[in-house]
Amino acid sequence: MENLIRRAFLQGMYDCSPFILVIAPFGLLFGVVAAEAGLNLLETLGMTVLVIAGASQFTALALLTEQAPTFIVIAAALAVNLRMAMYSAALVPHLGAASLKMRALAAYFMVDQSFAVAIKKYEAEQGFSLSQKLAYYFGCAAIICPFWYGCSALGALVGQAIPKSYSLDFAIPICFIALVAPMLRSLPHLIAALVSVLCALLLAWMPYNLWLLVAAIIAMAAGAQSERWLEVRRG
């Protein structure tokens, strides 16, 4: 059994390892942006370790730089991280029987990459025990999170020396496209994604990045409504 758990852990690390290619520049970019916003190394690392959610960190940092009201910063950061609630609900059938300590640890290390890779593995490996599922999940986190911490710190330290021509910000859209694209497996998924893109473009004029909140709400409503229509048609 111990060998199976170790194998699951190593398999998780291996399966998530391709994401290092986007996590590294993503983390570097956050360190650079944080330094430019006036955060020192300790503050940058503190935000990275405590929040450990790249998109939410970028959102909060951008709003803080724009002197947005605190409640707008908190609301926007929470809205970006609302997807973690959906991730948690999806993982309950697989990890819900784990101890409170293990679930709390899994919640802390929950990032887009570890969730996306783990849930795909759980669906493919029906015979995985709870211990194997936990080991696989933490194997995913073990290869992603240290790179996120380290590259954020490196970006804060040497970011100013990186030529702007390198355009590290390419990592952000690539990372999320790589995560989201495989999950668009139904018509409601596609409708929600399309509506979110259209709303984001049409509402880009809104201050304090409020378009993010509005577009997310409209897209979720569109996806949910289309799912209901499909269920009615199926009878």
Image (tube, rainbow, N blue to C red):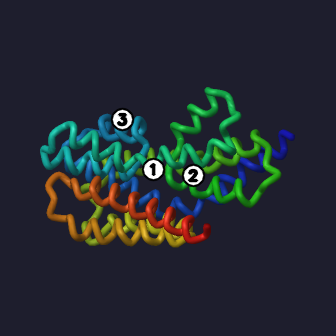
- Name the image quarter holding the N terminus: top right
Q: Are marks 3 and 1 in contact (CB under 8 Å)?
A: no
Query: Residue 75: where, in percent of width, then height?
Result: 28, 42
Q: Amino acid at mark 1?
A: Arg
Q: What residue is shown with label 2?
A: 115
Q: Are marks 3 and 2 in contact (CB under 8 Å)?
A: no
* Circle 1 or circle 2, nearest the eye: 1
Query: Residue 3: where, in percent of width, then height?
Result: 84, 44
Quarter-of-image position of residue 207:
bottom left
Q: Amino acid at mark 3?
A: Gly
Label 1: state its secondary structure.
helix
Name the foreground residue: 33 vs 8: 8
Work out whether residue 63 can be spotted. Answer: yes
What's the residue at 33%, 69% (across, down)?
197
Q: Residues within 10 Å of mark 1 (few under 14, many from 20)?
A: few
Q: Residue furthest right?
A: 1
Quarter-of-image position of residue 48:
top left
Relative vertical location of residue 118 with respect to residue 176 in this rendering, above or below: above
